[in-house]
Image: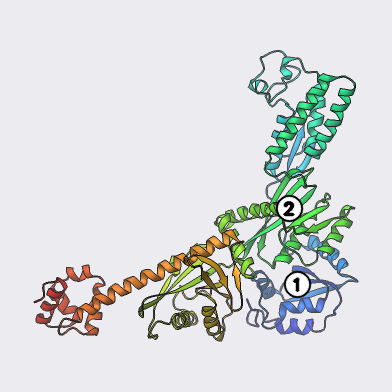
Amino acid sequence: MYITEQTNPRLPYLRDKTGKLTHRPGCYLMKDEGGTIIYVGKAKNLKNRVSSYFRKGQDHLPKVWKMVSLVNDYDFIVTDSEFEALVLECSLIKQYSPKYNIMLKDDKGYSYIRVSGEEYPRITAALQKEDDGAQYIGPYISSWAVKQAVEEANRVFMLPTCSKKFPRDIGRERPCLNFHIKRCMGVCRGKVSREEYNDAVRQAVEYIKSGSRESVKRLTEQMEQAAETLDFELAAKLRDRIAAITKAAENQKIVTEGIKDMDIFAVAVNSETAYGSVIMYRGGRLFDKSSAPLGMADEGARMRESYILEFYSARSEIPRDILLDEPIDDPELIERYLSERCGHRVRISVPQRGDMVRLTELARSNAEEQLSIKVGRTGREIAALEELAKALGLEKPPRFIECYDISNFGSSDMTCGMVVYENGRPCKKFYRKFSIKTVTGQDDYACMSEAIERRFKRYFEGEDEGFSTLPDLILLDGGRGHVNTITPIVRSMGITVPIFGLVKDSKHRTRAATSDDHEISLTAYRKAFALVTQIQDEVHRYAISYTKAKHTKSTLSLGLTSVRGIGDKKAQKLMTEYKTREALRAATPEQLAKTAGVGADIAEALYRHIHGDED
C-alpha cells in the first residue's frame, strides 16, 4: 500500500525533516497529531530507516501504512551503537506502550502449582497465589501445562488425590480404586510413614521443577546407595519410581533426548493479522506454552524480533537456547541483549533439520490454531497459505487468489473461467466466466490475454463487486508461456500482482508452479500443494462446465437457424429468452412468435421443428 499526500498531508514536512537526519544509530518516536507516541523503533542508520517510511512510491504493509498515515511528527535519540539503540527501544516501549508496537497482553491470568503446608502435603493446581503457608511453584502462563504437571507428578509418585484428610482419616475406610490400580500409595491404610510420604512429595516437587532426566539421575544415585547399604526395600521402591518416570516421559508426545532448557517461537499470519506462540521446555519436558495476538501483520523478521523482546521484557528466567521458525535480521544483537539481562549466554537459531525442526512446527501449529479461532479459518487453511507464500517468495500469505483456465471444443466455444479463493476457501460469489470474442482459431495465449485484459479493465471501472478487488496472487492454468504472455499485459496496466503458472504432469495432475524464469516445486510444501491442486481442479471444472453449457446452447441455436425465416439474431433472441431445449419445448407458437418477432406461419414451423415434427 502506498502512502501519498492525500493520505497524510504532513509528508512534505516529514520528508524535509528526514533529509537532515544523521546516519548514526538511534531510536525514533513517531507521534500523532495530539503528540501521543504511536510507534518506537530502532535503527543502525537513522536517516535510512526513517526515510523509508516517507519515501515516494514506498510500498507498505497495511500495519505500517496505517501508522505512517497518522504520523504528524517524530523525535529521535542518537546512540553510540546499535546495541544501545536496542536497549533504549525496549525501555521506551515499556515507558510509552505505543499503539503500533507489539504489546503482549495476558488476559487469562497466571496459574501455579500448589504444595500445601499440611502434615501430608497435597500437590494441586491453583489460579492465585495466597498467603496460606503453602509452597507455590510458578507462575505459569498456561493452566493446561499446570494441570498436566500436577496430574503427572501425582501419578508417577503415587500421591493421593482423594478428599481424605491425613492423618485424620488413616485407617477409617478401605483404600479407594486408585490404590488397587497402583495410582496411589495408600496412605489411608496406615502403612506409609509420614517421613516416607514427605520424601515422595519432595521428589515429586523436584521432578516438576527439574524434569524427568534430572529426577531419574538423582533417584538412580539414591537407589544405588540404598543397594550398597543393603536397604533392598527402599532400592526396590526407587527402582519402581524410576520406571514410572521413564514411562511417563515415553508417553509424552514431545520429549526428545536432545532437548535442553529452551523456548521455541513461531508466528502465524493470515492476511493482515498475526498470532505468536511459544512452547517452553525445561529439563527435557514440556513445561509451559503461551500464545498471544500480535495485532496487524508486520514484516516477518521485525515482527519476530519484537515478539521475543516483548515476551522477555517481564521475565527474569531466559533459557540458554531459543529456537525460531524463521530468521530475524539481528540475532547476534538480540542474543547480546538477552544474555546481559539474564547473566548467561543465550543462543538464537533457526533449525533446518531433525527434531528441532519438529519443535518449531509444533510451535507454529499452536500459533495457527489460535489464529484460526481468531479469524474463523482452520489451522490447515492458514498453514497452506503461509506455505504457499514461502514457496512462491511472497511477502505475506495471499488473502485473495484468482486462478484462470481456458476451455474450448476445438476452435469453437472458447471460454475462460476465473475462480477466486479468499483466505484459503472458494469465494463463489466472485467467480466469473468469459466468452472469448476476439480470437479465431485455437490460441490459448490469445484467449487468456483477452480475458485478463477485460478483467482488469472492469477493475478500473469499479462497477462489478467481483472485479473491484485486486487479488494478492494470480495463478494461470498453464506453463511459462502463459506467464510470459500475461505478465507484460498486467504490468502495462500498472498492476504489480505476482503471477505464476500451474504446471501439470503427464497424468494431468498438478506438478509445480512456474514464474517467468524458473519452475518451483511444491512437493515439499504439502498443505500448499494440496491447496494449489484444489484451486487448479476447481478452475478446470468451472471453465469446462461453462464451455459445455455454451456448446449446448450454440448447437441448439444453430439448429434453430435451419428453420426458414429464423436467422442468427432471431435464434439468439430465442436462446436468450428460453436458454434450454426444455424451455423451448414448453413455449407455445404464440410465445415463440412474440419472442422471435415473426409471423404465425414461421412460428408454427419453428414449433414443429423444436418438437421434431417438421415436414
Above or below, comparing residue 357 to residue 162 in the picture? below
Sequence order check, earlier mark of 2 and 1: 1
- Outermost residue on the front side: it is 506
Residue 2 rendering spot, x and y as whole percentages: 64, 78
SS class, disc 2: helix
Residue 581 x, y percent position in the rendering: 22, 70
| Left or right of residue 568, residue 479 in this image | right
Image quadrant assignment for residue 166? top right
Which residue lies under the disc numbered 1?
30
In this rendering, position of residue 341 left or right of residue 185: right
Quarter occupied by residue 498: bottom right
Check disc 2 and give the amino acid type.
Met
Above or below 457: residue 203? above
Number of numbered discs visible in the structure rendering? 2
Which amino acid type is shown beneath numbered disc 1? Met
Q: Identify the image quadrant of residue 480.
A: bottom right
Q: Quadrant of the C terminus?
A: bottom left
Q: Residue at image x 15%, y 85%?
A: 565
Residue visible at 76% across and 79% down?
51
Q: Which mark is residue 122?
A: none
Task: Please identify the quadrant where the N terminus is shown.
Answer: bottom right
Relative height, residue 182 to residue 39 (above, below): above
Separation of marks 2 and 1 at Cα, in angstroms? 39 Å
Residue 245 seen anywhere in this rendered image of the structure: yes
Between residue 298 and residue 549, name the one nearer to us.
549
Residue corresponding to mark 2: 356
Depth check, mark 2 against mark 1: the one in front is 2
Residue drawn at the location 14% of the way across and 70% of the way down: 611
Applied colour scheme: rainbow
On the image, the x and y values in percent for residue 330 come to 80, 66
